[in-house]
Image: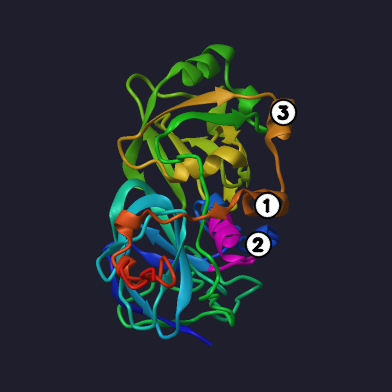
Amino acid sequence: MAELTIHSAGPGSITVQDLGRPGWTAQGLSRGGAADRLAVLETAALLGGDTGFAVLEMMGAGGVFSVDAPTRIALTGAAMQANIDGATVPPNTTHLLAAGAKLTVGGARRGVFGYLAFAGGITTAPIMGSRATHLTAGLGRALADGDRLPLGGDPAPDTPPLRLDVEDRCHGGTIRVMPCPQTDLFEDETLNSFLATQFVRSPRGNRQGVRFDHDGAGFAATGGLSVTSDLIVPGDVQLTGDGVPYVLLAECQTIGGYPRIGTVIPADLARVAQAAPGTKVQFALLTLEQADATAQSEVAFLRNLRAACQPLVRDPHDIPDLLSYQLISGATAGHDLESD
């Protein structure tokens, strides 16, 4: 069984993540898991994983990694510069990481959360049915220099390289929300003003949620000071006492008392997570029927991603060992076949 070594963990936190541990909300534990769930499914599609696939989540910056057996890898999510012993590793493609070779992943050029996956997946011991690190709840920890992690049994070194064309989720833009139980607490004028406002992702944010700043007065709900604490979920758009929206992410609390103006649909929540500080967004309200039409199970989404994977065609200009390939068999100097 292959083993992953972390030689250097960058300044951003690196954690093991999968799709989280549903079913514990009543006990006060949010689902957790990857901030960008779509990126984990993309790695699973490229490397033959399932919906339980565990990967490394790198927030803001990567590190230096190696394996002790040849292993296929893939990088998805935020655009991070990466190379294997100096050779560039493009995102959303699979590559062979040779035993002992150094994979270096730099800082995020676009987006926030990058995902590094290995064929066979990371196989640390599950806790409560998941390998996901939940920093807020104290389940697992951020990884550090010298840590070693077990990988799954099939590193797939002989699997042909693949690529997957994915939508850019790192540019902000329009974020779709659906009504939540407290949307009706907001006057139509307030709701319309909220939807017409352009917000900027604040530097304040983590895996629990991110703040979006704006010019002008804050947004308040009628009777907002008397809202009873109740269930909250990732995607909820909470408005704090000063009327500033926070969008909750994977490690949000399970109960909250701030009024919520809506909930980001699951299809767009990854775009919120990948909005780096300074990114501009605007919210658009869907009806419940419209929101339901966007829903797709993660099993179906993964199946569609697998079908979309294509063979990776290498550019000869990018193959440093091109001359070692036997492009034509039986080549001669051209003058060894003389006629009588």
Going by the image, does 136 lie left or right of 60? right
Q: Check disc 1 and give the amino acid type.
A: Glu
On the picture, is 44 further left or further right than 317? right
Label placed on residue 102: none
- Considering only vertical position in the picture, is 85 above or below 78? below
What residue occupies the far top of the structure in this picture? 189
Q: Quadrant of the C terminus?
A: bottom left
Q: Quadrant of residue 317?
A: bottom left
Mark 2, Cα crowd under 10 Å, few <14 / some 14-19 / many 20+, is some
Residue 288, label in figure:
3
Element marked by disc 1: helix
Residues at circles 2 and 3 in contact by the CB criterion of under 8 Å: no
Q: Nearer the viewer, mark 2 or mark 3?
A: 2
Residue range of the region highlighted in magenta in the rendering: 40-54
Which of pointers 2 and 3 lies earlier in the amino acid sequence?
Answer: 2
311 or 173, nearer to the observer? 311
Q: Amino acid at mark 3?
A: Leu
Q: Residue at x 24, y 66 (%)?
A: 86
Question: Magenta includes 45?
Answer: yes
| First reached walking from the N terminus: tag 1 or tag 2 | 2
Asked if residue 280 is positioned above or below residue 56 in the image, the reply reads above
On the image, the x and y values in percent for residue 290 come to 70, 26
**Residue at the spot x=33%, y=73% of the render?**
336
Disc number at residue 298? 1
Residue 25 x %, y %: 66, 58
Q: Is residue 277 left or right of residue 241?
A: left
Answer yes or no: do the residues labelled 1 and 2 have beta carbons within 8 Å?
A: yes
Mark 3 nearby-residue class (10 Å; few <14, some 14–19, many ≥20): few
Q: Secondary structure at mark 2?
A: loop
For label 1, the crowd category at 10 Å Cα-Cα, with few meaning under 14, some 14 to 19 and many 20 or more, is: some
Q: Which mark is residue 51?
A: 2
